[in-house]
Amino acid sequence: MPYFRTLTEISYELATRLPLLITQQGPILYLAENEKEARLLIDLGRYWNPNFPARAIISPYTQTQQVLTETAFTKLTLYLRRGDKITVSQLAKQLTDLGLEREPRAVSAGTFAVRGNIVDLIDYQPARIEFNNNCVEKITSFNPSTQQIAAPLTHVLVWPPAYAPHLPLWHEQDLTFEFVTPKYYYQRFSLLKQDAEQYLRVQLATAHAEQLRSFIPNAIFTGPQRGLEGFALPSAHFLFLTDDHIFGQDEATEETFQAHLDIASLEPGEYVVHIDHGIALFHKLVTMDGAQYLELHYDKQDKLFVPITKANRVERYVGPPHPRLTRLSGAQWETVVQRVKEDVRQTARELLELQAQREASTTTALPAQITSEENKIAQNIDFELTSDQAQAIQDILTDLASTKPMDRLLCGDVGFGKTEVALQAAVHIILHGGQVAMLAPTTILAQQHYELFTHRLESYGIQVALLSRLTNHQEQRQVFQQLKTGQMDLVVATHRLLAKNLIIPKLKLLIIDEEQRFGVKQKERLKALRHSAHVLSMTATPIPRTLHFALSGLRDISVLNTAPANRHGIVTVIDEYNETLEHRAITEELERNGQVYLVHNNLNTIYARSSTLQRHFPKARIAVIHGKLDATTLLKTMHQFYQGNIDILIASTIIENGLDIPNVNTLIVEHAEQFGLAQLYQLRGRVGRGHRQAYAYFLYYASRLTPQAKQRLKALHTIKELGGGFELAMKDLEIRGVGDMLGTKQHGHLQKIGLNLYTRLLNHAVQQFYLQSGSSETRPQD
């Protein structure tokens, strides 16, 4: 029989007695004073024994302060296992004493039936007990509707009526639970009554108990319970509904939920997040009773069947790989979400404080119209702006015409023209008397921006300078002085722009390329530069829909979705390393007077690789670059390659970001299995910047190809259209960007709940702060 103690009685004994008790046969019952203490006891039990089979039961009847003695509780508790000695008549009497009613057949909760040497009973769940010579021979669950055996059980446990577990929070470890999301009835009470009659136990968490009692008189009624989603548990014949299900309407149609989840694109085994129940694996689309359901698999083999009309509660998981699946039973998901909510509120507060600082700052409003000289510079290009570029430029001009400092995020896939938008914004500032600073994450990217801006602007008298490790001390001092006196109009720089002794008195625009590439300390310095200056941040990583909503109240966002005219998709070849294939690719590019990137990301062997390749291509001009080169050699080599004086550039991943050389249209990446998806995608973006067809070869070594690497290469191959990186990067590239954009600890939150739910919570927190502050401005709704 159960070992019975109250929490206060056993508090002293836990450390010494619990290890012994959990090895005893039979259940242990502790009556905790509240749910928190019950959970602590279970955690303690599992500390001593990880396989400790425990559950906590929270009953609305515990609020009646009813107390049972150990003897009384023992008499009112039935616990049977296979092999126990008891007669059928003794069992029938004990069931009657427990309050169960004897019927010809056990078909409803609180009944039992005797048929020869078989006793059927229905309490917490249906159980069939088979006897042999006054001994329990077999215990199984059964279906009351069909009377068919369902699954073997280890024991039968019938609780005293006052402590019946009507709403279990934990379940026995040895059961595979299948939860189904109920219908939304929209006050269709006759349908509600019809469905409720299919379950042995129905509980309604409602504020309208009296109204509903006439339709479902046998239901258990409790008050509204915040944060609980209705569910059905067919294996236990249990239905739990909230007012949301009873009075709410079917708000999702095919048109509305497809905006959240493209069901047709879901693959079996793909991670998804149900906003109410947590992270699961999508298994398949099933049909039951003429309706379609998403079958989701959770931890411990739990299952949830979500009607397709409620698929807007489910979203594809976007986050770091291999998240932990949620357990449906228990409060695991609610606990995780609550912890993230607490941190999200702090993040929202920090974002709003930063915005408040900028709101308090003012700047000089500029004319919204461009001058004739600006127009000349804008027209001095050999391509036409896309509609997205034109709109982004207009948005920026509108921002600059305000006394409120601009804070705009410009998103665009690789090669979609972000730099041209930034250049025209810089020109507008400079020709109206301001200075501009552009911050780039790498030396090579800063060098390329410097050369482009100089080429486009020097004939118009606009002075452009460079600050990077390619700038010697004397040149750096000169640039610092020119900026301080206002003689220098625009500076392109790496982290040297963040030097504390750098003074730019007329700084009116700060352009940040790939903001997420900068660290926490660098961002703190950036904040000091941003208070009164306009800010234009650029990123090649996408902003997901939910993050767009969350940030749109704090930052303005422009997205470049349209590829430049006459731009071709990149032919992508993914194959096992083959020297013949590699040589053929190089030969074909050189024969059309083009240039080649060959990525070999091993500094120990990169020069040997160059020597080997030179023997095969004796007439080709081959050079090597990597991050350990001295500044002079790096600058000289890149300048020669940019001018077309090098045919094959063997490089490390130093070329990953931003380089734009139209004559380079073949990329070869060796040991592609060693690269992340983000790196592979960014590297591929280094070619195809002109009007020629470009080719990217990702060559792997089969002996080192892990399943994860295989999936990355497969995913890369599926993106053939220009701009496809906005979809591809969700899984890999954007996660790091979003984490850095919002703070250093966000990566862990994204792992636990996924990006979409995280940003939904962030959006909600931002709106709540606005409401608390009394702001009348309407915030976006997710």
Image (cartoon, helix red, strand yellow):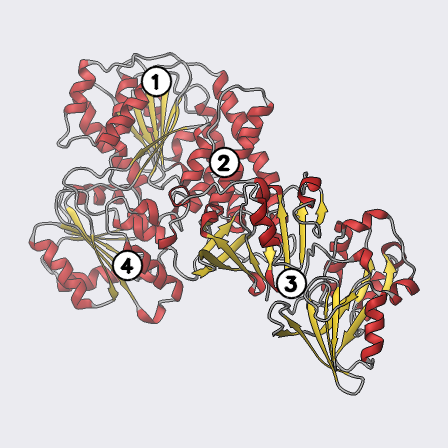
Q: Mark 2 points at which residue?
A: 521
**Mark 1 to mark 2 CA distance (whole Å):** 28 Å
Q: Mark 1 points at which residue?
A: 400
Please say if 226 is above or below 320: above
**Mark 4 to mark 1 CA distance (whole Å):** 48 Å
Q: Mark 4 points at which residue?
A: 606
Cβ atoms at labels 1 and 2 below 8 Å apart: no
Q: Which of 570 and 144 is in front in this view?
A: 144
* Element class at badge 2: helix
Q: Nearer the viewer, residue 288 or 711?
A: 288
User: What residue type is disc 4 on?
Assistant: Ile
**Mark 2 to mark 4 CA distance (whole Å):** 33 Å
Q: Name the residue under label 3.
A: 236
Q: Residue at x 22, y 43 (%)?
A: 638
Can residue 17 be seen here? The reply is: no
Camera-near label (4 vs 1) is 1
Q: Which residue is drawn at 80% across and 80% down?
A: 84
User: What residue type is disc 1 on?
Assistant: Leu
User: What residue type is disc 2 on?
Assistant: Lys
Please say if 536 is above or below 71: above
Cβ atoms at labels 3 and 2 below 8 Å apart: no
Q: Along the polypeptide, which appears first: circle 1 or circle 3?
A: 3
**x, y (%) of residue 362?**
44, 14
Q: Along the polypeptide, which appears first: circle 2 or circle 4?
A: 2
